[in-house]
Amino acid sequence: MSKLVVIENTVVRQDAFGRYCLNDLHRAAGDLKKDSPAYWLANKQTQELIEQFLSEGGIPVSVIRGGIEQGTYVAKELVYAYAMWISAAFNLKVIRTFDEVIATPTQPLTDKVQAGLAMLAFCKQELRIAP
């Protein structure tokens, strides 16, 4: 499991293939309807970018419907494109957060501990518990 990515107190979940959850990024960006992952995915430029990934043999997008892991998961490059589509300020925040996560050495955590931390952060956010 990769290092935990947290933007605006929102844990950005990853699927088993390392793709990042756009729904978590959407919440971190303010959860505005106009910034919905569905609108971004319908964008012509987004479709062209996804086609480029597919032509290279990648699977850049995975949609999970139902269950606790539900959401739209995308490759890291698409995370940057989504953040740029939302706003320059959010894009810069995402880039800096990802750079910091990569550059910061961490002590290894077991998958269960890391999953527990992600679940706690998610529950805190969903229940709107103050820090």
Image: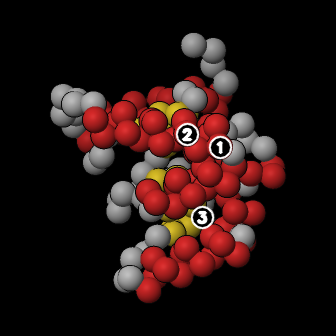
Residue 105 occupies quadrant: top left
Callout 2: SS:
helix
| CB atoms of marks 1 and 2 within 8 Å | yes
**Which label sits on residue 65?**
3
Q: Farthest residue to the top: give it.
A: 131
Q: Which residue position holds label 1?
A: 88
For disc 1, the neighbor class at 10 Å (few under 14, some 14 to 19, many from 20) is: few
Q: Nearer the viewer, residue 13 or 96?
A: 96
- Give residue 48's position: percent from left, percent from top: 60, 78
Q: CA distance from mark 3 to mark 2?
A: 30 Å
Side of 86 where 64 appears, left or right:
left
Identity, as a three-letter code, of the amino acid under mark 1: Ala
- Residue 58 vs residue 85, the one in the foreground: 85
Up/down of 55 relative to 23, above or below: below
The count of marks equals 3
Q: Amino acid at mark 3?
A: Arg
Identity, as a three-letter code, of the amino acid under mark 2: Leu
- Residue at image position (78%, 44%) is 32
Which element carries disc 1, helix, strand or loop?
helix
User: In the picture provided, is 103 more to the left or to the right than 19?
Assistant: left
Q: Residue furthest left?
A: 108
Badge 3 or badge 1: first in the primary sequence: 3
The kind of secondary structure element at disc 3 is: loop
* Position of residue 130 measured from the top left corner of the image (x, y, whole percent): 63, 15
State the colouring used for the structure image.
secondary structure
- Who's the residue at 67% across and 24% down the image? 128
Q: Residue at x 73, y 41 (%)?
A: 31
Find residue 92 and name its label: 2
Say which residue appears at 26% left-offset and 41% top-offset: 111
For residue 128, which numbered disc appears in the image?
none
